[in-house]
Amino acid sequence: MALQEFAPAAALLGLSVLVALLVVMLSRLLGPHRPTSRKQAPYESGMKPIGQAVRRMPVKFYLVAVLFIIFDIEVIFFLPWAVVFRDLGVYGLIIMGVFLFILTVGFIYEWKKGALEWE
C-alpha cells in the first residue's frame, strides 16, 4: 500500500486544521475583545458559583462510560464483517458467533455485578 493512497485524507485533514485555525485567528483579530472581571467569572445558571468548581464523580459514572465505549467499539466491528460476509462463508459466521457469545457473556457478567444500575 503506497502512501499516495492516503494523500486525499491527508489533504482533507490539513485543510480542516487550516480552516479551523483561520476562523479562530480571524475572530480574535476582527472581533471585540474587552475582558472584564464579570466576563472572566464562572457562569452557573445566572447565580454566583457555590463551592469548588471541581467535584468528585462517582465511580459508577466512569464504569458505565467505559462499558459504553467498549460495547460501542465492539459494535463497530459488525459493519466490516457484514460487508465481507459472503466472502467469509461459514467460517466468518462461526467466528462472529464466537465474538457475539463472548460479548454476551461479558454483558451478562456486568449486568449481574450491578455495573449497569444507576442510583
Image: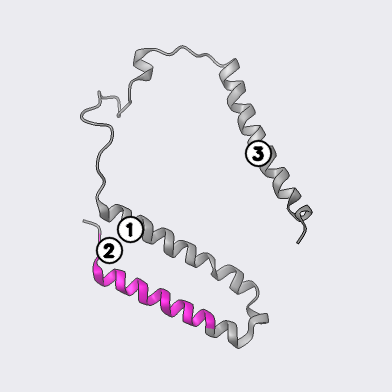
Q: Residue 49, how many percent across, how many down?
A: 25, 26
The amino acid at mark 1 is Val
State the residue at coordinates (29%, 70%).
111
For label 2, count other residues whose C-alpha is less than 10 Å away and answer few (under 14), some (14-19) or many (20+): some
Q: Is residue 91 above or below residue 16?
A: below
State the residue at coordinates (48%, 67%).
74
Q: CA distance from mark 3 to mark 1?
A: 33 Å
Q: Residue 101, how many percent across, how many down?
A: 42, 80
Q: Residue 69, how many percent across, how many down?
A: 43, 58
Res 28 → quadrant: top right
Res 67 → quadrant: bottom left
The amino acid at mark 2 is Ala
Badge 2 element: loop
Read off the residue under disc 2: 115
State the residue at coordinates (70%, 46%).
10
Task: Tell me the quadrant of the picture where the N terminus can be found.
Answer: bottom right
The front one of 116 and 58 is 58
Q: Which mark is residue 64?
A: 1
Residue 113 part of the magenta segment: yes
The color scheme shown is: one colour
Q: Which residues are magenta?
A: 95-117
Earlier residue among tags 1 and 2: 1
